[in-house]
Amino acid sequence: MTPSHPTVPLVAILRGLQPAEAVAVGKVLHQAGFRALEVPLNRPGAIECIAALVKEQLPDTLIGGGTMLNVGHVEAVYEAGGRLLVSPNCNPAAIRRAADLGMYCAPGVATPTEAFAALDAGAHALKLFPADMVGHNGLKAFNSVVPAGTPMWPVGGITPDNMEGWVRAGATGFGIGGQLYTPGVSLDELGQRAAAYVSKWRALAV
């Protein structure tokens, strides 16, 4: 069974999220319109945060892990209820295992070789990372060779102000990290940042 594509293809990268605040942060982002939440595994408490967010049952929301580097990470996130794989790299074994479990897979790629290896392993979307290294011209080149309709999500340095240029170059979604969430940000500020991204996306996606 192919997992559902996020209805709003903006992935909130919640690096450094703590279990005690996970639900409150998730609710704010959901209210603003985010429908994909990623908790990177390279910070303490990530699996606990994923489990708490899953338990909250935010409607129509894809929840999972980031910096998922191996099959062990896939197993841990899946066991916590996560159904989204995001990684900075292309590890075909991890992608294949996640896809077999029915998870939505968005591994990181920076070259056509990585892109096709990821797709062959079962990736559903390609995370272009680091986005500033790939650039607009790089994204256009990717789109000229990958299968038509492949979701392409730049990640790294994405702001509401630079989203339009990426969309013109062929981006169909984004991963958004430190410009959206940083540990210690107030819920009010987070809500304002999130709303700005969703508003810009809706304006561009029409």
Image (cartoon, grey):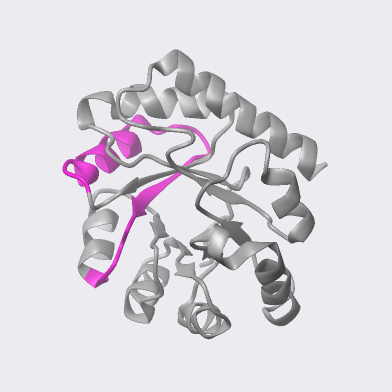
| 38, above or below 113, in the image | above
Residue farthest to the top? 188
Q: In this view, does 73 lie to the left or right of 88?
A: left
Q: Quadrant of residue 33?
A: top right
Residue 55 painted magenta: yes
Query: Residue, x 18% and y 41% (percent of image)?
Result: 45
Image spot of residue 8 (x, y percent): 62, 43
Does residue 116 appear to the left or right of 185 in the view shown? right
**Residue appearing at x 67%, y 79% in the figure:** 146
Q: What percent of the width, then of the height, locates residue 137?
A: 71, 68
Look at the picture and state if 69 lies above or below 200: below
Residue 91 position within the rendered picture, expressed as x and y whole percent measured from the top left: 36, 76
Residue 175 drawn in magenta: no
| Residue 128 location (% of width, % of height) | 54, 64
Give the quadrant of the C terminus: top right
| Position of 187 relative to 71 (above/below) | above
- Which region shows up in magenta? 43-71
Which residue does the image show at 21% across and 58% down from the upper left? 76
| Residue farthest front in this picture | 133
Q: Quadrant of residue 103?
A: bottom left
Please state the total of marks drawn on the protein image: 0
Residue 40's place in the image compared with 73, above or below, is above
Horizontal side of residue 189 vs 203, given as left or right? left
Give the left or right position of residue 20, taking residue 103 as reference. left
Q: Residue furthest toward the right?
A: 206
